Image: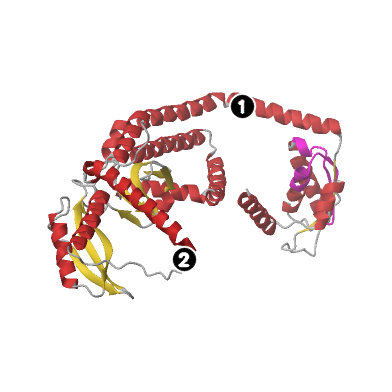
Amino acid sequence: MKILLGTICLLLCQLFAANPVNAEQITDLLTGNTATESTTTPDKIITVNHSKQNDKMIEKRLQQIYSELDELKDVRASVSNGVVTLQGEISSKEQEAKAVQFANQMENVIEVENKLVVSRALNKRLNKTLNKIKVLGEQALAGLPLILLAFLVLWLFWFMGRWISNRQGFYRRISVNYFIADLFSKITFLIFIVIGIILALSLLDATALLGTILGAAGIFGLAIGFAVRDTVENFIASLLLSIRNPFEVNDFVDINGHLGNVARLTSRATILISPEGNHIRIPNSMVFKSVITNFTSKPERRFQFDLGIGTGQNLSQAQGLALDTLKALPGIMTEPKPQAIIQELGDSSVVMRIFGWVNQQQCDFLKVRSEAIKSVKSALDEANIVLPYPVYNLKISHDKDQSIEKTQEKVDSTKKVNIQKVELHTDEIKDITVDRTVEKQIEKENVQQNNENLLDPNIPDEI
């Protein structure tokens, strides 16, 4: 709204700058004073010889002109030595200007002295207004067939545009998705409407009005464009995303720090479902400008984890044991090969970083990584390769020894119970099949709710 008001003020300033109005003109308009200064024509040459016959001819000719015009019948002109004096009562400033203009156009006129009075009589103004209304009514009745024909042309083009825009099958064949097809149909309908308006105004001989409407629409559209800039940006981003197709339904992606499976792409936002089952709605303008990490665009995915090895242990033996363990685990690919490298030397340990590859279409990534960590840890323990423990300095008083021993007994008993419970679920722990929970939830939502989705599996993905 502020932008629109600013634009209107700017246009008004330009209008007044192009047509300046001085204070005297404003005062005359408000007070109704019709006595204006004499109008001179400095471009005319004043002749030395002048006769009274010329004055009479000028006076006679002006009276003939004024008598032919209804609004100037009461104007009287008197001429003396080329100076024309206009007297009488008229109804408006426009009539006054017209009378003065006729006098200035006469040959041998040196100056025009305006003594015309603008009438403020109510009955005359009412009669004038009623006459104008009568004339307008007569003109409207005379032009009624043409007006009806213009409305018929406009309705015909509206109907044709509506019918053609509803042929969605045609637009879907020439478009990459339904969103683009719907956009093409709306543009087609708008083109037919504009053509109908132009033809209707041409029949009414009002093409100048079209220019005014287009100019006002341009200024209004500019103001609206600034006001809804974010909405327009989001719409354009939706259009580009639907064409480029950077991800597909059920792809696990990271968009601006938001992790989740892609549920759908709408005309306003991208909907993700997080691993916790929550819906994440991200505006498409943000999606288009963000760095997108697609974890499922390729079936192979690498995992890594770190293990600390004691500084006194055989590092080569630890590396070989970790690689042999990974190669024997189900779910870990033999090509690309797993790796175990020495990452860095710490204060009390050596950090060994282990890499492995998983085919996400066949095995669950997180489950395979979990089994790899457990298996490598168990293999190193069996080979007596010590994993360093954190070092703490503890101060224990003698009167608390007994309570500490009791606490330790409780911890040991709890560990035994937990170990027994874990052994009862060994099959579930070693299961590495792909978890399809979120994918099933997305499929169920899209089928039951019939949600809008601009992602088309038939469109090639962005590379």
Q: Secondary structure at mark 2?
A: helix
Q: Give the extent of the magenta segment.
A: 70-98
Of labels 2 and 1, earlier in sequence is 1
Q: Which percent across, then down, holds residue 329?
A: 15, 53
Q: Which percent across, then down, holds residue 72?
A: 78, 39
Q: Is residue 116 left or right of residue 418?
A: right
> Residue 136 occupies which quadrant of the picture?
top right
Q: Which percent across, then down, holds residue 87?
A: 86, 45
Q: Is residue 105 left or right of residue 441?
A: right
State the CA–CA distance, disc 2 to disc 1: 114 Å
Vertical arrangement, residue 346 with respect to residue 306, above or below: below
* Residue type at tag 1: Ala
Foreground mark, 2 or 1, reads 2
> Is disc 2 in contact with disc 1, using a CB cutoff of under 8 Å?
no
* Residue type at tag 2: His
Residue that appears at 74% across and 37% down: 69
In front: 166, or 10?
166
**Label 2 sits on residue:** 398
Residue 276 highlighted magenta (yes or no): no
Q: Is the residue marked by circle 2 packed among few (<14), some (14-19), or many (20+) residues within 10 Å? A: few
The quarter of the rendered structure image containing the C terminus is: bottom left
**Label 1 sits on residue:** 140
